[in-house]
Structure formats: structure tokens, C-alpha cells
Image (cartoon, helix red, strand yellow):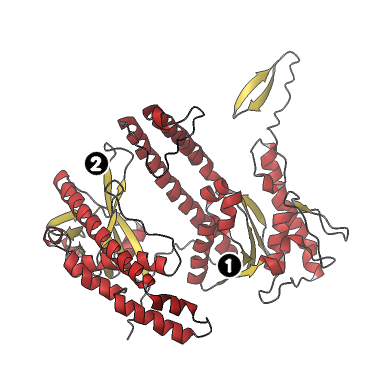
């Protein structure tokens, strides 16, 4: 009988770790890394043996219509070769040898076995090409328990004794920094703790605040039973909202409210520029340390199957650490911007309609924008939030709807190149910005029906709303802000007032600063 699943949310707290505790924690993590690699190697060994069996090919050759027969054949093979989660739990008992047992208890070993099996099972199901073993340099940066009763667990004092909290692992008590004035922390610690997870992250340098001698910071993540904290100011709208998500912009058009066309995560641009500078510095240091690995054109030499030997200086390692820290900050900033945009959309309405897009295909054509803005991650965040508010998010295929080619006035499809950013039809609809128009059509689309059902009187007020959204961006362009080309507004510089004095030099903006032209 399956155990009932209760809702779970996470709460992260920083830990205070002294030098002795940090040394023991590094030993624990190294033992967990060795055990995980052993379990992963055993899982892949069993998978290769199972795939080499002729019965595996016979099971694959069965017609897809015979679902029950295929399932029984694959299940039998998994039982014969011990490729299952519980079989890996049994192997973990033998793999957890004497020196590892001093660091990793039996429950945590089973957790690592589950983690290794899930990685190998993704390869078995075709969801991944290979597994990744944890090298000594990369290491294993998180370990968790299955419950909060034994092994690694979080202890919380009752209010009358001080409300302090510690993470207990082996014989170490690691105090947690708890801000009881934070409503998120206060709400989370009132719920039952399911299990605890210890996470370590690289700081920018060993001298950073809270870092140990190797530059690690330690945190505890508590898996709590219940619902996460929701701010009171978050109100949920009831309107139907259409979205048009692009690599650099997003159009938000409700059926009744204000329409918006905003650049996607434009606050990330300074972080991305700082990251690129560190990447260029890292490349210069690597080339200076290893000139023998580059040819006369500056390309890395090809040695066939032989691997090149690379020398890493202390400056190179310091720059690489700073780059990793910048990546973590950029990811946290992006997640915060996604959350803010999701709440703005939910405030308009929790019935969302958008196109079903392939963000992996976008990576080939818009690699930098997709890597910086992560539109797929944003849509996953939006889907979870809409579900938690009781709303619905409908995705419809682009092949059948083709909203960017549709005109509701004459009800015809006209194919437009990607460079054409404005919709202007001879029937009198337009000119209107292409992304805003697609989002407006999506808001009036019934998911089972590929053609939007729009009353003509709804367009009379909508064209003004869409025009107002474009005027906001035109004003920003006149002020000198560079906008994505997909907006369809040519880039403009700031227009400064002319000086009344005839002999004064004219001032213009150039590369973010004022310059004088004779």
C-alpha cells in the first residue's frame, strides 16, 4: 500500500561552523562522495548487464500496444539483475564499509543509494545519456536523511527554553542562525520537520564572511510538512491572462486589465556583463599558463584520445571561484525576478493561456538570451504558483493556433517573417505590436478550439490598451534605453534640450556617459 503524500516546502537556514567542525564535515562529505560513486558504479554495471541480455532486445521489440506484456518483461529483467531501488539499498549495506561507516549511517547510505539509482534509471529510460560521477575536485555538496528521528537531524528548542536550533550530525552540534522576526522563518518552524538536508556552497574566497578555510559556507534545508508562507499583499485576480513568452521579452495581456510588454529579466544585464569580464579574464589566465596547448591561431590543439595537461595557477583558481560565486548570485537574482513577475501576473488573473514552446530549440538560436533569462524555468515557476492558487495554466500547440499569423478581423492566416514585428492587415486591424497581439489572441482562445472566439466590440477598447503598452516602451527608447530588437522599436539616444547659449558645445550620450561634440 502506498503511503499518503503530504504537501512539503523547504526552509533554508545558515549554519555557524568552527574550524574543527568544518574539518569533520569535509571528511563526512568525502566519505559520502566515495560511497555515492561506488553505488552509482554498481547501478551502471547492473544496467549494462541487463541491456546485454537478449531478453532485453526481445522486450524492446514488443509492440507498444502490448503495454502489459512489455511492462512484465522489463520488470522481470529488473528483478533478475537487481536493478531496483530496494536492491541498491541492499548493496549499500555491503558498500558501507568500516571507514565509511564512521561517517555515514545506514539511513543516509540508503538515501545515497536512492539517489544513485534515480540517476542510473534516467539513463535506462532514455531521459539522460550518461551519469556523472563526483570527482574529488567537484565533490558532493549535499547530503540528506530520510527522517528527523535518528542520524542527521534538526533539533529545535521549545519557546520557553530559548528557541535555538541545531543540526546534529554524528557528534557535532551545528548552531543555526534563526531570525524569528522573519515571517517566513517563523511560519516554517511552526510545522513538522520531515527531514534535514545539509548543503555546502563555495564562497567568493576563504576570507568571505561565514566561510571556512577552504571557502565553504554551510546551510541546513528543512523539509517541512504543510504549505509555504504567503504574503498578505499577494492578491489573486480572476481575469483571463494571455501570455506571449519570448527569449528577451514577455507580453502580458488580460482580457480586461492593463496590457504590458516588458523586457525579460533586464535587471540581469549588469550581472551578465560582470560574468563575461570574469570569463575573459579566466581565458587569458588559462592561455598564459598553458601556451603549449594552443596552436598559432589560438585554437586548442587536438591530441586525439590523449587528454591535454593543464596547469592551473593560484590566480586562475581564485578567478574561477569568483566566477562560480557570480554564477550563483546571478541564478539567485534570476529566481527572484521570476518570482516577482509571476506574482504580477497572478495579481491580474490566475487563468493563464499561452503557447507551448520548445525552449531547448531556442537554445540553438538564442543561446545567450535563453541562458540568461531561462524562460522555461519561469514557466515552471508560473505553473506551480497558478496550481497553488487554484487556477489553471493552459498551453496550446503553435502548429494549430498560429497566433502570430492570425488576424481576427478577416479571420485569415498570413505568414510573416520573424523580422516583421508589427501586425497591419488591409482589413483595418493594426498597426499593433506582434507579441502584444498574439498575447491578446491567446487571452480569447478556448484551449479545445484552435481559433480564437472574439467579439468585435472587445477589440474597440483593446487596441488602445495595446497601444498604451507600446507608448511606454517608446518613451523609454527616447530616454536612451536600449530595448530588445524583438520589441520593434528602433534604438534611440537621449534627446537633451538645446542650450540657449550659441557658443556652447552640444552634449550627447555615448556609451553611458556625457560627451561634448565640437
Residue 49 x, y percent position in the rendering: 33, 70
Q: Quadrant of residue 131?
A: bottom left
Locate residue 39 relative to residue 247 in the image: left or right.
left
Quadrant of the image containing the N terminus: bottom left
| Within-10-Å neighbours for mark 2: few <14, some 14–19, many 20+ | some
The residue drawn where x is 51% and y is 63% is: 380
Q: Which marked residue is nearer to the observer: mark 2 or mark 1? A: 2
The residue drawn where x is 75% and y is 73% is: 453
- In the foreground, 462 or 399: 399
The residue drawn where x is 17% and y is 60% is: 168
Locate residue 34 relative to residue 476 in the image: left or right.
left
Q: Secondary structure at mark 1?
A: loop
Residue 400 x, y percent position in the rendering: 70, 69
Residue bearing the label numbered 2? 214
Residue bearing the label numbered 1? 237
Q: Quadrant of residue 407?
A: bottom right
The extreme front residue here reads 54
Q: Is residue 291 above or below residue 481?
A: above
Residue 9 seen: no
- In the foreground, 176 or 500: 176
Quadrant of the image containing the C terminus: top right
Residue 35 x, y percent position in the rendering: 22, 60
Q: Is residue 162 above or below residue 121?
A: above
Q: Secondary structure at mark 2?
A: loop
Residue 268 x, y percent position in the rendering: 51, 44
Amino acid at each position: 500500500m502506498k503511503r499518503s503524500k503530504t504537501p512539503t516546502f523547504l526552509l533554508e537556514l545558515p549554519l555557524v561552523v568552527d574550524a574543527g567542525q568544518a574539518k569533520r564535515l569535509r571528511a563526512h562529505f568525502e566519505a559520502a562522495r566515495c560511497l555515492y560513486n561506488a553505488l552509482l558504479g554498481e547501478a551502471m554495471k547492473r544496467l549494462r548487464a541487463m541491456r546485454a541480455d537478449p531478453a532485453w532486445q526481445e522486450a524492446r521489440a514488443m509492440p507498444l500496444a502490448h503495454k502489459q506484456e512489455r511492462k512484465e518483461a522489463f520488470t522481470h529483467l529488473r528483478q533478475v539483475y537487481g536493478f531496483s531501488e530496494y536492491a541498491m539499498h541492499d548493496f549499500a549495506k555491503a558498500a558501507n564499509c568500516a571507514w565509511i561507516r564512521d561517517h555515514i549511517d545506514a539511513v543516509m547510505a540508503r538515501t545515497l543509494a536512492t539517489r544513485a539509482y534515480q540517476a542510473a534509471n534516467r539513463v535506462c529510460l532514455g531521459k539522460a545519456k550518461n551519469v556523472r560521477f563526483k570527482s574529488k575536485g567537484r565533490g558532493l555538496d549535499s547530503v540528506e536523511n530520510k527522517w528527523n528521528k535518528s542520524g542527521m537531524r534538526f533539533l529545535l528548542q521549545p519557546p520557553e527554553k530559548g528557541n535555538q536550533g541545531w543540526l546534529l550530525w554524528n557528534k557535532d552540534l551545528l548552531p543555526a542562525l534563526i531570525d524569528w522576526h522573519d515571517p517566513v522563518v517563523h511560519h516554517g518552524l511552526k510545522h513538522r520537520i520531515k527531514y534535514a538536508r545539509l548543503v555546502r556552497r563555495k564562497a567568493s574566497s576563504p576570507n568571505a564572511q561565514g566561510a571556512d578555510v577552504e571557502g565553504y559556507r554551510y546551510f541546513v534545508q528543512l523539509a517541512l510538512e504543510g504549505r509555504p508562507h504567503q504574503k498578505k499583499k499577494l492578491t489573486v485576480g480572476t481575469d483571463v491572462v494571455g501570455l506571449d513568452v519570448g527569449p528577451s521579452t514577455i507580453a502580458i495581456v488580460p482580457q480586461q486589465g492593463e496590457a504590458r510588454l516588458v523586457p525579460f529579466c533586464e535587471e540581469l544585464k549588469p550581472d551578465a556583463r560582470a560574468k563575461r569580464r570574469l570569463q575573459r579574464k579566466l581565458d587569458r589566465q588559462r592561455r598564459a599558463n598553458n601556451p603549449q596547448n594552443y596552436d598559432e591561431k589560438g585554437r586548442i590543439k587536438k591530441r586525439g584520445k590523449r587528454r591535454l595537461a593543464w596547469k592551473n595557477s593560484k590566480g586562475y583558481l581564485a578567478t574561477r571561484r569568483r566566477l562560480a560565486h557570480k554564477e550563483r548570485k546571478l541564478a539567485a537574482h534570476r529566481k527572484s525576478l521570476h518570482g516577482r513577475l509571476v506574482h504580477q501576473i497572478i495579481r491580474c488573473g490566475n487563468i493563464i493561456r499561452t503557447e507551448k514552446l520548445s525552449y531547448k530549440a531556442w537554445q540553438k538560436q538564442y543561446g545567450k538570451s535563453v541562458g540568461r533569462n531561462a524562460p522555461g524555468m519561469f514557466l515552471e515557476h508560473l505553473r506551480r504558483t497558478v496550481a497553488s492558487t487554484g487556477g489553471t495554466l493552459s498551453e496550446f500547440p503553435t502548429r494549430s493556433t498560429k497566433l502570430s499569423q492570425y488576424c481576427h478581423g478577416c479571420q485569415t492566416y498570413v505568414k510573416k517573417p520573424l523580422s516583421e514585428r508589427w501586425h497591419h492587415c488591409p482589413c483595418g486591424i493594426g498597426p499593433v505590436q506582434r507579441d502584444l497581439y498574439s498575447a491578446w489572441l491567446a487571452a480569447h482562445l478556448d484551449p479545445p478550439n484552435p481559433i480564437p472566439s472574439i467579439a468585435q466590440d472587445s477589440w474597440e477598447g483593446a487596441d488602445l490598451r495595446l497601444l498604451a503598452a507600446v507608448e511606454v516602451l517608446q518613451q523609454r527608447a527616447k530616454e536612451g534605453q536600449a530595448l530588445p530588437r524583438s520589441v520593434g522599436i528602433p534604438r534611440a539616444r537621449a534627446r537633451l534640450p538645446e542650450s540657449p547659449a550659441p557658443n556652447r558645445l552640444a552634449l550627447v550620450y555615448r556609451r553611458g556617459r556625457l560627451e561634448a561634440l565640437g
